[in-house]
Image (tube, rainbow, N blue to C red):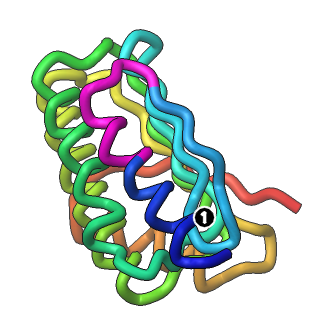
Amino acid sequence: MGMLATKEIIKEVNDAVNKEEVSIQGTAETPEIKLDANNGEVKFSGRSMPEDAKSFYAPLKQWLEDYSQNPRQGTLVTFAYEYFNTASSKMIMELIERVKMIQENDPELRVEWHYLEDDDDMLEAGEDYADITGVDFEFHSYE
């Protein structure tokens, strides 16, 4: 994965802000992203270690912020990261803070945190996020 690919993905992510429906394929360095305002589905999965986590996640935070103004009731937000680096972990925290904004207008909001069965670190990360943000997570392990 060269710089170019990352740049293209960042461009795709930037374009996402104005769309109701976004689907961005995951790469070795960036997560798969699904944002669907009409169906109330938000999903981040895979690996997150983009070269510039701040630039990568900024438009996604913006999308969630915009969505939080008028969310579909019963929105489902899923986090299913296999791995993320330190820079991403701060950005994920900021995503979850935006998810909390959704909750204000969607009391039926559900947040799922999926982690590999024996990955205690990923489970703990999810528990920490839930504690710090005050958002209720449902935890699901997979093999």
- Residue lying furthest right: 143
Front-most of 5 and 106? 5
Front-most of 105 and 16? 16
Front-most of 77 and 7? 7
Left or right: where 127 falls relative to 143: left
Residue 31: which quarter of the image? bottom right
Q: Residues within 10 Å of mark 1 (few under 14, many from 20)?
A: some
Q: Amino acid at mark 1?
A: Tyr
User: Of helix, strand and loop, which one carries label 1?
Assistant: strand
Q: How many marks?
A: 1
Residue 23: x %, y % from top left: 55, 34
Residue 76: x %, y % from top left: 46, 30
Left or right: where 20 falls relative to 2: left
Residue at x 60% of width, y 51% of height? 32
Does 79 sit above or below residue 54? Answer: above
- Residue lying furthest bottom: 86
Residue at x 25% of width, y 49% of height? 59
Residue 24: x %, y % from top left: 56, 42
- Does the magenta portion include 122? no
Residue at x 23% of width, y 63% of height? 94
- Does the magenta portion include 15? yes
Residue at x 16% of width, y 16% of height? 70
Does 40 sit above or below residue 58? Answer: above
Residue 130: x %, y % from top left: 34, 62
Segment colored magenta = 12-21
Quadrant position of the N terminus in the picture: bottom right
In this figure, which residue is indicated by the disc labeled 1?
A: 81
Quadrant position of the C terminus in the picture: bottom right
Residue 7: which quarter of the image? bottom left
Left or right: where 41 falls relative to 81: left
Left or right: where 48 falls relative to 108: right
